[in-house]
Image (cartoon, rainbow, N blue to C red):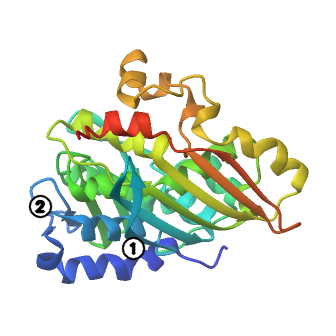
Amino acid sequence: MKSLSLNRMALPLVEELVEGADRYGIEVVEMASGATLLDLGVKAPGGVAAGLRMVEICLAGLGRASLSWSRLAGLDFPAVAVRVDAPALAALGSQMAGWKLSLVGRTALGSGPARALARKPKKIFRVLGHEEESDVAILALEADALPGDDLAREVADACGVRPSDLYILVSPINSMAGMVQVVGRMVEACLLKMLNMGLDVNTVRSAMGLAFLPPLHPDPDVCMGRANDSLLYGSSVWLTAKMDDEVLAEKTRKLPSSSSPSYGKPFLTIYEEAGRDFYSIDPSIFAPARVVITSLSSGRTYVAGGINERILTMSFGLRA
């Protein structure tokens, strides 16, 4: 899809946020560098609607996100639903948090279509065969502080655009928008694990996902744990793919998080046992709880994994 511009596809959604800033509960600031900063939850209240738009922007306008409901421990529980066509390009080429940046002395992971201009990381875009062209760049950050002009200029330079043509969206994990945009990454988690298993992600034609929207907590670490528990123990992804049945029969059962030896523990426990280092965690745990794949070659559907209500009930702090 060399002619498709991910940044241009996402731009109308960013403009909608800017024009409806009051309605979305966000703040829009023109930085000294000329870049446009959208605060979706650091100082501004943000909200569910802002988070859903952030999911769609991170998917480069190739997917749609909505609030849904699902049953958990006998309750009707809010959930984020995502549907996306061209899922490999949308999820891995844009939504994946694959750009390491420094913000207030800490590492912040950048996602969104700006990654395609900067080709962060390069190996992803070699797999996708995508060459991005755009005179605007759109970056999303999960952070609890707003970036300064040094970061804006660094990103603009890496993307080959003027700072005045750069948009930066920021939301912390302990905000409603931040929580929504993190749990809206279930398709990305599934496709990244497929890629790491050596499967051809470009054969995936469509994807749908559902993940519980956890209750917020004042402690960012608790929110981070709940968001990851929602993905690892409470998300479902349904893919349609042009793959051989022999491959699907063998590989589908290895796709859910339950294939990891770390499975069965709350994510905060896993994180602490890894010395609070994400890169020391077994990567096979980062996957949806349930994966369903329909083969376009045969029409057969393969199912693996399941929802873990015990972990979710404990993680979300549900009380009778």
Position of 116 compared to 197: left or right? left
Q: Residues within 10 Å of mark 2 (few under 14, many from 20)?
A: some
C-alpha gap between disc 1 and disc 2: 27 Å
Which residue is pictured at 34% across the width and 57% down the height?
A: 77
Q: Residues within 10 Å of mark 1 (few under 14, many from 20)?
A: many
Question: Residue type at mark 1?
Answer: Val
In this orientation, which residue lies closer to the viewer: 74 or 283? 74
Residue 119 appears anywhere in the view: no
Q: Position of residue 147 (x, y in %)?
A: 20, 51
Q: Quadrant of residue 101?
A: top left
Which residue is pictured at 25% across the width and 37% down the height?
A: 317
Question: Residue type at mark 2?
Answer: Pro
Q: Position of residue 144 (x, y in %)?
A: 19, 45
Residue 169 appears anywhere in the view: yes
Q: Position of residue 293 (x, y in %)?
A: 72, 58
In this orientation, which residue lies closer to the viewer: 34 or 26? 26
Please tell me whether mark 1 or mark 2 is closer to you in this view. 2
Mark 2 = which residue? Answer: 45
Position of 157 compared to 46: left or right? right
Give the quadrant of the C terminus.
Answer: top left
Question: Are the two marked residues, 1 and 2, in contact with CB atoms closer than 8 angstroms?
Answer: no
Q: Earlier in the sequence, mark 1 or mark 2?
A: 2
Q: Secondary structure at mark 1?
A: loop
In this rendering, the count of numbered labels is 2
Q: Position of residue 304 (x, y in %)?
A: 68, 46
Which residue is pictured at 35% across the width and 44% down the height?
A: 227
Q: Secondary structure at mark 2?
A: loop
Q: Which label sits on residue 208? A: none
Mark 1 = which residue? Answer: 136
